[in-house]
Amino acid sequence: MMKIPIFYPILDADSARRNGLSPVEAALRILSGGARILQFRYKAVFSRQVMVDVEKMANLCSQSGAIFVINDRADIARMTGAALHLGQDDLSPSQARPVIGAAATIGYSTHNEQQLLAAASEPADYLALGPIFGTSSKQNPDPVVGVEELRRLRRFTDRPLVAIGGITRANARSVIAAGADSVAVIGDLFPEDGRIEARVREWVELLSR
């Protein structure tokens, strides 16, 4: 069974640009801070320039010994040798597996008990569960799971479980204590002072205690 890094940064392309950074520059700073996995989330059309950026981020992850994850797109993950993360509205893991290959890592998002149980029959290497807390990173988020429901649902799967949604440095330890193997962070990657590397180091230190 795969071991997933406890700190799981998700680089949202729009968030990076709002903070005055290209996705490649943001990726470089996140990896420089010590991240060992990085998911790239991009919801628009994969233009030629975006593909150039994706290839650069894949190379940066390879040089850093980090896992590179593409959100939603099995074809792009296959082209770049990346892992793939799928949501409930994307291809299912069983549909994506022939595209991405038997050896590639697939993650799969769940939001409640029914989806978590259904994921047992899917060829996913790890599962995500959330939102654990309220989140502003999605326009139409699913109902909040909460820490106690995370604790209850943990026993329904033996796969690595990534908690996501509204997780901050103040509440992250409670999420790990409730059974999550890893915490996904989106908004808190970009501090107001712009010191992304320092913020990532802070996260890594916090979660390694």
Image (cartoon, rainbow, N blue to C red):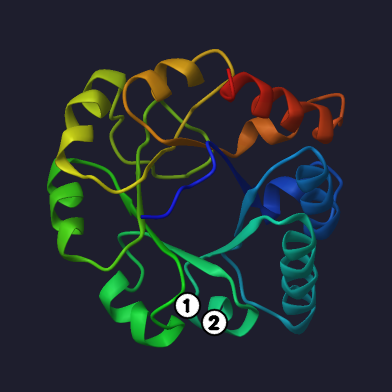
Q: Is residue 151 above or below residue 3?
A: above
Left/right placement of residue 59 relative to residue 6 reads right
Mark 2 falls on what kind of element?
Answer: helix
Q: Which mark is residue 74?
A: 1
Residue lying farthest to the top in this orientation: 170
Local packing at callout 1 (Cα closer than 10 Å; few below 14, some 14-19, many 20+) is many
- Helix, strand or loop for disc 1: helix
Looking at the picture, does residue 163 appear above or below residue 107? above
Q: Is residue 111 left or right of residue 203?
A: left
**Residue at image location 73% in from the left, 60% down from the top:** 61
What amino acid is labelled 1 in the image? Ala
Tag 1–tag 2 contact (CB < 8 Å): yes
Residue type at mark 2 is: Arg
Residue at point 81%, 34% (across, down): 196
Instruction: Tell me the quadrant of the picture where the C terminus can be found.
Output: top right
Q: Can you identify the residue that label 2 sits on?
A: 78
Relative to 10, is 3 on the left or the right? left
Query: Residue 103's spot in the image, x, y percent?
Result: 44, 76
- Vertically, is 112 above or below 96? above
Please tell me which residue lies in front, 197 or 67: 67
Q: Residue at 47%, 77% (x, y): give it.
A: 74
Above or below, 37 against 125 in this view is above
